[in-house]
Image (cartoon, helix red, strand yellow):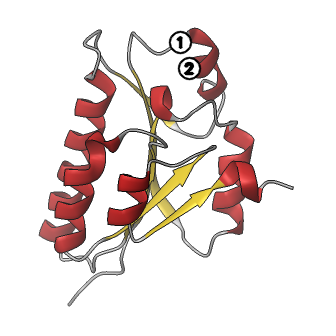
Amino acid sequence: MKLKPLNHIFVDVENSAGLEVVYLENFMKNSDAKFSQRIAFISKNTPQHLSSKWQDSNFQIVKAGSDPDAADFFLKDRIISQVIQDRKANRVNGSIYLVVTGDSDYCNLIELISELGWEIHVIGWGKINPALAEVATSSVNLKLAKT
């Protein structure tokens, strides 16, 4: 028997373009999706003004190292681990929501996870990298959607 799908949201804080947490939380609240994982990835290179926005949020904070791409590596690894875990638990594929606005380094991961049957939604604050928007199931610019 297949278990219900889980939805997960992962935030690369350094590549969130300064997204205010409240706008993302409102988007999540207004979405039909229920989220089992809410994780924000912060590296030692993430500017303090960006990382401090996430400290009092309902997101789990994962701190990465000082490598320039540390948050990217941690986030990608966590997504792959979650997909494997969900498959082993015999879950129906769900959706992964990525807040990675301008980082096209995620394109290969998005294509791979999409080929496995997952929906990948890119959430941005401002311009979303066209390459990301092209490979994702959907993309939304919360800056344009805010009221």
Question: Which residue shows up at 33% across the image and 27% down it?
Answer: 71
Residue 90 lies, in percent from the top left, at: 18, 77
Residue 62 visible to the viewer: yes
Q: Where 71 sits versus 117, above or below?
A: above
Question: Residue 69: which quarter of the image?
Answer: top left
Which residue corresponds to mark 1? 47
Residue 92 located left or right of residue 140? left
Residue type indicated by callout 1 = Pro
Residue 22 lies, in percent from the top left, at: 74, 42
Confirm or deny contact between disc 1 and disc 2 (CB under 8 A): yes
Question: Which residue shows up at 12% across the image and 67% down it?
Answer: 88
Question: Residue 135: which quarter of the image?
Answer: bottom left
Of the numbered discs in the image, which one, if any, rests on residue 51? 2
Q: Secondary structure at mark 1?
A: loop
* Classed neighbour count for the residue bearing mark 2: other residues with Cα under 10 Å, few (<14), some (14–19), many (≥20): many
Q: Nearer the viewer, residue 27 or 103?
A: 103
